[in-house]
């Protein structure tokens, strides 16, 4: 019986099913049943940062990573989405086969799509009510729903096709498309993991060369180009299926650490010139011409490299068995990360509500900070309620099952 190493923790395990699965080339799976709290922690952090970044600029905005480098919370969210998707459905594909795993993935895609449609409907109702109630059409214009008010029939169809999206609703459509192609991604990674990643890099390069993109309604293109952002998603899946383990020596190297630190420091000084234009003279013109624009739509290489540097240092200095992951102070972030779909949708609602409150009542830095903190507390509270409900439901189901089994045993004994 062979052993398979955990790509995150690096600890081997023995298991009959995974021993059979180990015959698949270049793929390894984490230990079944173990939850990676670091993923939940950083996914929860990404959700909070996305919420704060969607609000008007305030004190808490300066705590988000986009002010100190090229990448932001979106990269964290997409990478972890790819990692966890491969973590869950990669095992299903190895143990149950391609067809069953694909069916499970399509079921999840449908759940996300329904959540997106629900979010779109309620978000439109929220914006329309506020714009009408307070007689301020600027809300409709700022949130990008003017076309819906002019042609609701056509716009709804385009929304169902993921081509029309109000402001702040671009992440879920990207996630839906990436999950839609997850069966092919997992099949390629199962066949040859490095070849699958190389094909992803090739698609990314061709996207930049030929300017491939998806069009949006009524004009323009997707804010997050799936042809480019798939690289981060596939890279997350590749890491989950053995890539992280095979990179462990590189990540542990002091040379890698110092390269990452140097790059992050350089990115910090570049972003500093954005906030303090007087420092612009420190940037050589040739570097500016080569560097700008740093495209978020097409996941610029500089953004991708910035995320990789952050991830490498995180893995190095935050081990999986870090005791702080059990701390009650991090529990709110972890809870939000464990219920990411619900909390993301809630965050979109709260971001517009906060925007409306700040626009109507005004206020200074204190009001902005209070609105931001109130939104975070609501997200935490809802995540706690969802977690409590699921725990209670699972506990009740377990008791019911035990009662049924016990009754069956008694019936069998009396017979």
Image: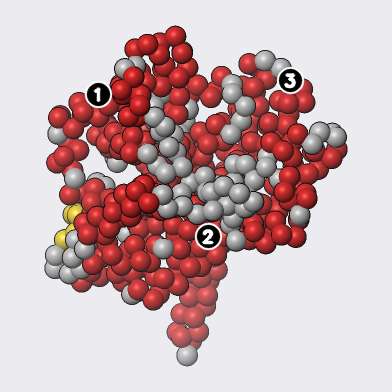
Q: Mark 2 or mark 3, which is nearer to you?
A: 3
Q: Mark 2 or mark 1, which is nearer to you?
A: 1
**Image quarter of the N terminus:** bottom left
Relative to 14, say whether 357 is above or below. Answer: above
Q: Which residue is labeled 1 in the image?
A: 262
What residue occupies the far bottom of the structure in this picture? 415
Q: Residue at x 51, y 70 (%)?
A: 401
| Disc on res. 394 | 2
Q: Earlier in the sequence, mark 1 or mark 3?
A: 1
* Residue 251 in view: yes
Relative to 307, say whether 204 is above or below. Answer: below
| Closer to us: 364 or 168 | 168
* Residue 307 in view: no
Q: Which residue is labeled 3 in the image?
A: 362
Q: Residue at x 59, y 55 (%)?
A: 163
| Disc on res. 308 | none
Examine the image and state in which quarter residue 184 appears: bottom left
Q: Earlier in the sequence, mark 2 or mark 1?
A: 1
Examine the image and state in which quarter residue 373 appears: top right
Relative to 133, say whether 187 is above or below. Answer: below
């Amino acid at each position: 019986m062979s052993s398979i190493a955990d790509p995150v923790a690096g600890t081997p395990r023995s298991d009959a099913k995974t021993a059979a699965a180990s015959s698949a080339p270049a793929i390894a799976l984490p230990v079944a049943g173990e939850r990676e709290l670091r993923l939940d922690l950083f996914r929860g952090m990404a959700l909070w940062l996305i919420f704060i970044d969607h609000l008007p600029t305030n004190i808490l905005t300066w705590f988000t990573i986009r002010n100190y480098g090229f990448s932001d919370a979106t990269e964290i969210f997409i990478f972890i989405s790819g990692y966890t998707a491969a973590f869950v459905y990669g095992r299903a594909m190895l143990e149950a086969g391609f067809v069953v795993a694909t069916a499970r993935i399509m079921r999840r895609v449908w759940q996300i799509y329904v959540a997106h449609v629900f979010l779109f409907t309620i978000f439109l109702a929220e914006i329309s009510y506020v714009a009408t109630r307070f007689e301020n059409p600027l809300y409709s214009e700022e949130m990008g729903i003017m076309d819906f008010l002019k042609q609701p029939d056509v716009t709804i169809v385009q929304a169902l096709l993921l081509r029309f999206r109000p402001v702040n609703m671009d992440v879920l459509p990207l996630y839906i498309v990436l999950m839609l192609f997850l069966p092919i991604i997992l099949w390629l990674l199962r066949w040859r993991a490095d070849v699958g990643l190389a094909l992803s890099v090739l698609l990314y390069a061709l996207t930049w060369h030929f300017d491939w993109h998806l069009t949006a309604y009524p004009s323009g293109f997707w804010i997050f180009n799936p042809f480019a952002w798939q690289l981060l998603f596939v890279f997350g899946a590749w890491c989950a299926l053995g890539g992280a383990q095979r990179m462990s020596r590189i990540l542990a190297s002091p040379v890698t650490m110092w390269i990452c630190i140097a790059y992050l420091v350089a990115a910090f000084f570049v972003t500093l010139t954005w906030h303090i234009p007087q420092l612009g003279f420190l940037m050589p013109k040739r570097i500016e011409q080569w560097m700008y624009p740093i495209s978020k739509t097409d996941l610029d290489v500089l953004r991708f490299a910035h995320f990789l540097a952050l991830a490498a240092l995180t893995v190095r200095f935050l081990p999986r068995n870090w005791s702080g992951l059990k701390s009650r102070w991090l529990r709110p972030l972890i809870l939000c990360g464990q219920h990411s779909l619900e909390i993301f949708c809630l965050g979109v609602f709260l971001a517009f509500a906060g925007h409306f409150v700040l626009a109507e009542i005004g206020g200074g830095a204190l009001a902005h900070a209070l609105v931001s903190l109130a939104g975070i507390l609501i997200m935490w509270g809802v995540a706690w309620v969802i977690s409590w409900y699921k725990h209670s439901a699972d506990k009740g189901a377990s008791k019911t099952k035990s009662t049924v089994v016990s009754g069956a045993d008694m019936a069998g004994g009396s017979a």
